[in-house]
Image: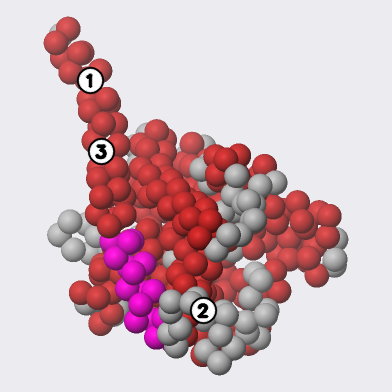
Amino acid sequence: MNAKGRLLELDCLRGIAVIFVITFHFTLGEPNLKPYFRFGCTGVDLFFMISGFVIFLTIEKTKHWKDFLISRFSRLFPAYWTGVTLTTLFILGWSAAIKSHHTFPDLTAYLVNLTMIPSYFNVRYIDGVYWTLLVELLFYLLMLGIFLVKKLNQIEWICFFTLILCLVNGILFKAQLIGVHDFFKQYLPILTFFPLFAAGIMFYRIKFHKITLYRCLLIVFCLVVQVALFDDTGKAGAMTMMQYTLIVAVYFALFFLYTFNWLGFIVNKVTLFLGKISYSLYLIHDYIAFFILIPLFTNTKHFHFNYLVADFLIVLPIIIIMAALINRFVEIPAMHYLRKKWSSRKAEPVANERREF
């Protein structure tokens, strides 16, 4: 942690995770490249572990539930609304340019997507990667609920019983109880990935509280449960269960190194920069890049670049620049503005009380 309270290694892990995800998505349309980047889909798993660590750190320092809501809202929604709007404009512009009759997204789909939970309304995500944001929101709500009932000090037991629930959900999938499982998949997708969040929480508890045998065993249980849920993660088409196990185990090992201050070697200007813009980059990298920019530079009458060149030498720099601009002019300013306004609003009653006194 640096002087400003940032968790530098975790910021860098975010940067690494987003590059993993980008390379996976960028190469889906090229059979010759896909085998080399297929493991990049696990970058999402790393994101969830980071969230478990960071959000529990945040909630432990929170004094009022409204502070937590403002903190999460200001962090997520301004950049998200920008990403949804840009993606929609790109889709409509591209459809018009190629004279496509594809009408998605219409105004209703756009407005519902702004809620970040379109699947609750049976509306398709404008960009497929946005499903992960619902998982994040559900985790935030779970942490907020635990905070409200004042049970943060019992988080280990809560994680343990929730992991059991995750296993039950996995059994429903394997037993082909499709109706029940589909309900959980649509409304509680966190049950497929909660072990990753729980592992992040346990690593936090070890790093900033103390190491205990129970916490160590719970981390192992998190790994076992997450691997048991492999078929439900949607990654079976990209890798085997053994490969997934090894990759997630590596992520756990990275957190072990971080917990004991041995992960400093990943901190550099590149990973820090990518970590800083990782959220904005994640929001715009998939549909805009894969469905619009890559086809534009590889398969139009004006451009016929090699797929590898188009992916990493043209499109990747473009979306990095776009993400940096969103981060610089929307994400950070909006977050600071909203949090400052909230702090000012909280200070007003105190100031009035002092004047009355």
Of labels 1 and 2, the one closer to you: 2
The answer to whether residue 47 of the structure is visible from this angle is no
Q: Main secondary structure of the magenta part?
A: helix
Q: Magenta residues?
A: 308-324
Q: How would you rate the neighbour count of disc 1 (Cα within 10 Å): few for under 14, some for 14-19, many for 20 or more? A: few
- Residue 49 lies, in percent from the top left, at 46, 66
Q: Which amino acid does label 2 sit on?
A: Asn
The label shown at residue 348 is 1
The residue depicted at 33 percent of the width and 46 percent of the height is 61
Q: Mark 2 points at which residue?
A: 299
Q: Mark 3 points at which residue?
A: 337
Q: Which of pointers 1 and 2 lies earlier in the amino acid sequence?
A: 2
Q: Are marks 1 and 3 in contact (CB under 8 Å)?
A: no
Quadrant where the N terminus sits is: bottom left
Quadrant where the C terminus sits is: top left
Q: What element carries label 1?
A: helix
The answer to whether residue 113 of the structure is visible from this angle is yes
Q: How would you rate the neighbour count of disc 2 (Cα within 10 Å): few for under 14, some for 14-19, many for 20 or more? A: few
Question: Seen in the image, is 112 located left or right of residue 208?
Answer: right
Q: Which of pointers 1 and 3 lies earlier in the amino acid sequence?
A: 3
Q: What residue type is labelled 3?
A: Tyr
Nearest the viewer among 258 and 106 is: 106
Nearest the viewer among 214 and 114 is: 114
Q: Is mark 3 on a helix, strand or loop?
A: helix
- Residue 287, relative to residue 145: is it above or below? below
Q: Distance between the residues labelled 1 and 3?
A: 17 Å
Nearest the viewer among 100 and 346 is: 100
Of labels 2 and 3, the one closer to you: 2
- Residue 341 lies, in percent from the top left, at 26, 31
